[in-house]
Amino acid sequence: MEYFDWTAAQANVRPDKAALINLADNRRVTYRELHERSGHLAGALQQHSVTKGDRVAILALNGPEFFELEFAGGKIGAITVPLNWRLTENELAWILGDCAPKVLVHDARFAETAASLKERCGIDALLEIDIENQPCAYEQAIAASHSYKAVAQTHDDVTMIMYTSGTTGHPKGAMITHGMNFINCVNTGIPARITPDTVQLVVLPLFHTGGLNCYANPVLHAGGTVVLMREFDPGAALDLIDNAELGLTHLFAVPAPYQFMMQHPKFETTDFSRIVMAGVGGAPCAEAILRGWMSKGILMNQGWGMTETSPGGTGLDPSDAERKLGSAGKPVVHTEIKIVGDEGETLPRGEVGELLIRGPNVTPGYWNNEEATKNSFDGDWLKTGDAARFDEDGFLYIVDRWKDMYISGGENVYPAEVENVLYQLEQVAEAAIIGVPHERWGETGKAVLVLKPGAELDEHAVIAHCLENLAKFKVPETVEFIEALPRNATGKVLKRTLREQYVGSDAPAIS
């Protein structure tokens, strides 16, 4: 199926309507402007020798540039790589070394890091965004370019690479196709009741699939308006919801922003009457948060998904929210899921096994990583690594972490990545990371270490080392020193035993 340019279609139908509202500089970008600016950017990229299949990375806080770059890539076949600005330079350098972009678009805030990455990773050119000092390099490039050579594409062409934390210590680049983006507009847009009248507030970072695709891209596909917060602030978000002139109708977030807003004094006086739908995902949502928002008359759209699934995989209709509280719902329209046992057999309802998913919303694989792609699929079924069960009515419940990943503030943290850094300390003989409950972030890491005979090391030195080499959300909050890690007969560390020891026997289960 041929890929069609969304911005061209919307510019033809509703040219003067606001596609994007950027709160950082009070700028409204109409659909005509989004189409024209992304076209000029496409021409500028071609002037930097960017051709079909070449990568262009972006390291920036939330802003219209994410969408301008995404749709510029759609016009010329370039692949966008959004970067997590929370990562350290070393972590970013690994990702850029893997995807080898020709151009790096970056905020002025990250100018020093970008300059260093350009040299380390052999990037051809930088384009700096600076909303406080115009004209910046990014705006100059757009102003100087007026034409581009369109490149035909299909829904099977890759439009984006989104890096997720890897279980082997390095991130994996999930390939996102045009078709996946389109199917996500159907799979999530219809249940979320997105229309041309939708006005959505984006509070999650746009480098995250939740920020970009729940529901920003579906809103633009429908011809609605996306309102961008540069960085999330709970009081400011509540003021925006309360603003009748702005007329917000939709929200989406991981549980933490909902919790922070609910705990803010303004929550009690905010007028939520215009909110049509509030989506929540990315991490298990506490019942108290769901009930707190539902008490305001808000429809909460709960669901499950992954970067690799566009991300919509399942959803819980608001009509079932009360009676199936805690469920991830049922498969979205163009998706199929099943739960299998250790031998790959399909399990009956009620039994816990691994969740598998297939459909046109699923990634074709991981960039430059055939082994990870092969290991992640059973035929055309993606192995999610999550343990789950169906109840008697066919509603899905995520009941455990099949893998050892834990979620801190909505961000996935894979222990192997942190453990690799801990093993850089010469005093460490054995290392394990587990997630433990945290009132603010949901979970944080606990490092359990065994030192070499005669070695000395304290908690402060361990955390200081991690802060130098890992994004802050990955840094363990506490460190425990023990004599030996619990292992099974094959030598594998028993993470469940550690969780039982430090958290309790029911710690791994989630709902």
Image: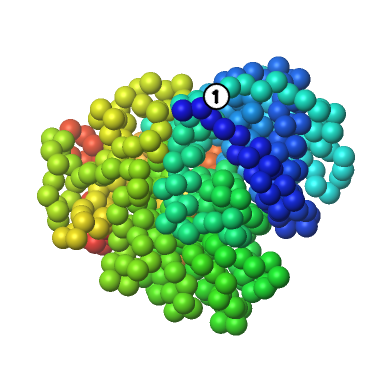
Q: Is 294 left, or right, of 132 in this rendering?
A: left
Residue 268 showing in the rendered view:
yes
Image coordinates of residue 277 in percent, x first then y, are 49, 65
- At label 1, counting other C-alpha atoms closer than 10 Å, the crowd grade (few under 14, some 14-19, many 20 or more) is many
Identify the residue shown where x is 56% and y is 82%: 268
Residue 153, above or below 336: above
Residue 145 falls left or right of residue 422: right
Left of 2 or right of it: where is 503?
Answer: left
Q: Which residue is drawn at 46% across and 28% down?
A: 1
User: Furthest-bottom residue in view?
Assistant: 269
Camera-nearest residue between 451 and 249: 249
Mark 1 lies on residue: 153
- From this view, report whether residue 153 is shown above or below residue 166: above
Residue lying furthest front in this view? 13
What residue is drawn where x is 47% and y is 72%? 298
Residue type, label 1: Gln
Q: In which quarter of the image is residue 230?
A: bottom right
Q: Which of 95 and 266 lies nearest the eye of the viewer?
A: 266
The quarter in which the C terminus is drawn is bottom left
Residue 164 at x, y percent in the picture: 46, 38
Give the image quarter of residue 69. top right
Residue at (40% x, 44% y) in the render: 306
